[in-house]
């Protein structure tokens, strides 16, 4: 099938300039491989949601093309969108309806959904996000996290080929975040491609196989997470009560960017054998509790790529 | 590939109506809709009670000096069925269209404001289908609102006044059953009189992401048009105002019925529906949904 080679999502030169003149997305060439859990990263205002809105046919691109599941968008919305579940910029719900009735309404909006299985599918989606007990409550009485879960349930009313989740863990407690992560893994193992946007780098790193990084509307990097982080070097971490002395020795041994954080001293590892660095620490009387290399994170990769932090652009 | 290819589901014509059903239940279960209908139901109760109290001393209904009260009000004491005509004549200039303006103005803009519009569209409801559904639900509200007034008036009329044969405006007498048939027809005509405004409100609703703004704008337009319709110098354009022929429903209480203005009213409503329906469609199908 063409969508296999093409990628589940493929954009070419995708650009959006809002009516106010704001260039939100600038010449985006994005390819999301089938079966991947794809992290779409970028600081606030970098154009993630705008990209997702164009992919979902909500916003017309100023120029460029977008294909989703092998079909051009927004032209093929009717064929594509029933196979896509989406959570865009947080959930939006009818406060005067119960959780269950919200899902019944969204399901009725899909002309391909079978009304005979509607109630069972709604019940299954509620079960999946752990809202069965609150299903009969009016949504205006839901907490932020419960709304987020209900929005997610709406995306899971049908088996989907693609799940697009814009900041899905917003407002969730740590338990909720863990549940989302395991849900994403579970869906991915069923073969659903998951496109996950976030400004929280570690969140993405834990579940994603692939990632793309946006900044100021432009794509800075994309590829497998392992490849992206391979470029950035890990950090040397020393755990010790004698942090001051340890920092001095590490600098002496050639470590760069030495940072002391409580009982941890970290730095860019020097070029020499780390065994010698450790020996030097011990020789200087530093009581070493832990000594090791920490794998490079996506954030390190991002900083290495851009030479800047993960901050909002004006 | 180990992908779970979801079975390709295709839209079925009947399932398309599922959205309309959902729209109707959502609209008519809303507290706001019920409040509007409640207010409308109360109007005939107030008129009926006022007439009953005022005539309890045997004086005729309406101002004693021979001035005009609302249409048909003088007849109510003879025949409770006239309360239906009076109530519709009283609510048609403002209460009914205001309620319709609220529902129509909120139709798209309210969903946009709540953000639910984007989820309906990715469901995917389809923009044309959603717009048609919204218009159909608004027209259903026009019918419901009108019938709430009519049924409430009939109930109050039957309770407080005698029912029976009625004298038409032309002076002839028709039987009660035929009178009831005319009342039904009038309610239908009054409901259809509101469809032009419904289309206008729906168009306004596609222009903004604020339900309140759209409702206010629609009701504002209603008031403006009602005022323009009163300015003698504007008589050349008045036949094109959506409210100009509204009160022509009274011609159904003539014998024989005068059809001219009734037909013109329906033509004006059809014109407004076509023009503003198309404008709403052109706007809504090309609009960026950013809310
Ligand atoms: N409706 C709009 N009209 C004009 N400009 C907009 C609109 N929506 C977004 N923008 C601008 O487009 C840029 C990208 O916004 P977007 O919402 O896509 O960012 P994002 O990456 O999703 O950010 P966040 O992480 O905060 O959700 C921002 O500079 C924003 O100000
Ligand atoms: Mg966003």
Image (cartoon, rainbow, N blue to C red):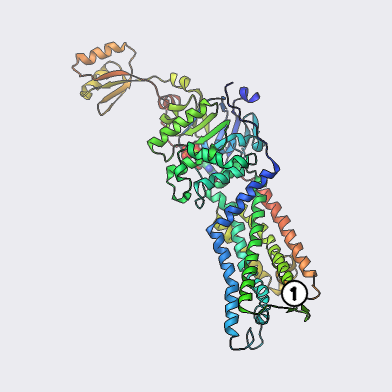
Identify the element where label 1 is drawn.
helix
Nearest to the observer: residue A24 or residue A136: A136
Above or below residue B169? Residue A64 is above
Above or below residue B266? Residue B5 is above
Subunit bearing disc 1: B
From the top left corner, tell me how far across and down residue A51 is, in percent: 55, 35
Nearest to the observer: residue A17 or residue A8: A8
Extreme left residue here? A285
From the top left corner, tell me how far across and down residue B247 is, in percent: 71, 71
Who's the residue at 47% across and 33% down the image?
Answer: A42
Residue B188 can be seen, yes or no: yes
Above or below residue A51? Residue B21 is below
Nearest to the observer: residue B208 or residue B192: B192
**How many numbered marks have been drawn onto this rendered protein structure?**
1
- Looking at the rendering, which quadrant does residue B36 occupy? bottom right
Who's the residue at 64% across and 81% down the image?
Answer: B69
From the top left corner, tell me how far across and down residue B176 is, in percent: 73, 75
Tell me: A202 left or right of B192.
left
State the quadrant of the N terminus of chain A.
top right
Residue B289 can be seen, yes or no: no
Tell me: A275 left or right of B270.
left
- Looking at the rendering, which quadrant does residue A193 occupy? top right
Tell me: B1 left or right of A284.
right
- Looking at the rendering, which quadrant does residue A133 occupy? top left
Who's the residue at 58% across and 74% down the image?
Answer: B45
From the top left corner, tell me how far across and down residue B47 is, in percent: 60, 76
Determine which residue is flagged by label 1.
B253
Crowd around label 1: few <14 · some 14–19 · many ≥20 (10 Å) = many
Who's the residue at 47% across and 31% down the image?
Answer: A183
């Amino acid at each position: 099938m063409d969508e296999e080679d093409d990628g589940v999502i493929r954009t070419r030169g995708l650009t959006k300039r809002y009516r106010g003149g704001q260039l939100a997305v600038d010449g985006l060439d994005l390819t999301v491989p089938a079966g991947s859990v794809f992290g779409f990263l970028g600081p606030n205002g970098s154009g993630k949601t705008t990209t997702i809105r164009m992919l979902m046919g909500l916003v017309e691109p100023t120029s460029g093309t977008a294909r989703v599941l092998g079909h051009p968008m927004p032209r093929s919305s009717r064929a594509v969108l029933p196979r896509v579940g989406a959570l865009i910029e947080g959930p939006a719900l009818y406060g005067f309806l119960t959780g269950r009735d919200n899902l019944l309404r969204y399901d009725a909006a899909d002309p391909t959904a079978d009304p005979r299985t509607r109630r069972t599918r709604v019940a299954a989606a509620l079960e999946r996000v752990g809202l069965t007990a609150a299903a009969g409550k009016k949504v205006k009485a839901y907490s932020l996290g419960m709304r987020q879960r209900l929005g997610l349930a709406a995306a899971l009313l049908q088996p989907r080929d693609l799940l697009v989740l814009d900041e899905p863990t917003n407002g969730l407690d740590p338990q909720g975040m863990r549940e989302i992560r395991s849900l994403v893994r579970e869906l991915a193992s069923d073969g659903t491609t998951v496109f996950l946007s976030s400004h929280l780098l570690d969140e993405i790193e834990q579940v994603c196989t692939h990632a793309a990084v946006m900044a100021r509307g432009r794509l800075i990097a994309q590829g497998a997470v392992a490849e992206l982080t391979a470029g950035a070097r890990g950090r040397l971490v020393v755990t010790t009560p004698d942090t001051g002395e340890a920092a001095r020795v590490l600098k002496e041994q050639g470590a760069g960017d030495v940072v002391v954080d409580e009982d941890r001293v970290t730095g860019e590892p020097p070029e020499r054998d780390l065994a010698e660095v450790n020996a030097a620490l011990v020789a200087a009387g530093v009581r070493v509790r832990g000594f090791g290399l920490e794998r490079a994170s996506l954030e390190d990769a991002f900083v290495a790529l851009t030479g800047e932090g993960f901050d909002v652009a004006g | 590939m180990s992908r779970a290819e979801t079975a390709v589901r295709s839209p079925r014509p009947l399932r398309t109506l599922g959205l309309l059903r959902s729209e109707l239940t959502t609209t008519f279960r809303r507290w706001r809709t019920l409040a509007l209908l409640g207010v409308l139901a109360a109007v005939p109760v107030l008129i009926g009670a006022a007439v009953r109290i005022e005539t309890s001393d045997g004086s005729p209904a309406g101002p004693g000096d021979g001035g005009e009260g609302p249409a048909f009000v003088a007849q109510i004491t003879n025949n409770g069925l006239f309360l239906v005509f009076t109530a519709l004549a009283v609510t048609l200039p403002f209460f009914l269209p205001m309620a319709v303006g609220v529902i129509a103005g909120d139709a798209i803009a309210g969903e946009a404001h709540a953000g639910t519009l984007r989820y309906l569209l990715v469901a995917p409801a389809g923009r044309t289908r959603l717009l048609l559904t919204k218009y159909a639900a608004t027209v259903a509200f026009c019918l419901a609102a009108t019938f709430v007034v009519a049924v409430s008036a009939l109930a109050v009329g039957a309770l407080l006044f005698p029912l029976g044969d009625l004298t038409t405006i032309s002076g002839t007498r028709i039987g009660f059953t035929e009178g009831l048939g005319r009342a039904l027809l009038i309610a239908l005509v009054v409901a259809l009189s509101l469809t032009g405004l419904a289309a206008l409100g729906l168009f306004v609703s596609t222009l903004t992401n604020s339900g309140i703004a759209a409702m206010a704008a629609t009701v504002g337009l209603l008031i403006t048009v009602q005022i323009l319709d009163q300015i003698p110098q504007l008589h050349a354009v008045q036949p094109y105002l959506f409210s100009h022929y509204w009160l022509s429903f009274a011609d159904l209480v003539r014998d024989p019925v005068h059809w001219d203005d009734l037909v013109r009213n329906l033509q004006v409503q059809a014109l407004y529906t076509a023009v503003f329906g198309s404008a709403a469609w052109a706007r809504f199908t090309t609009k960026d949904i950013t809310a």
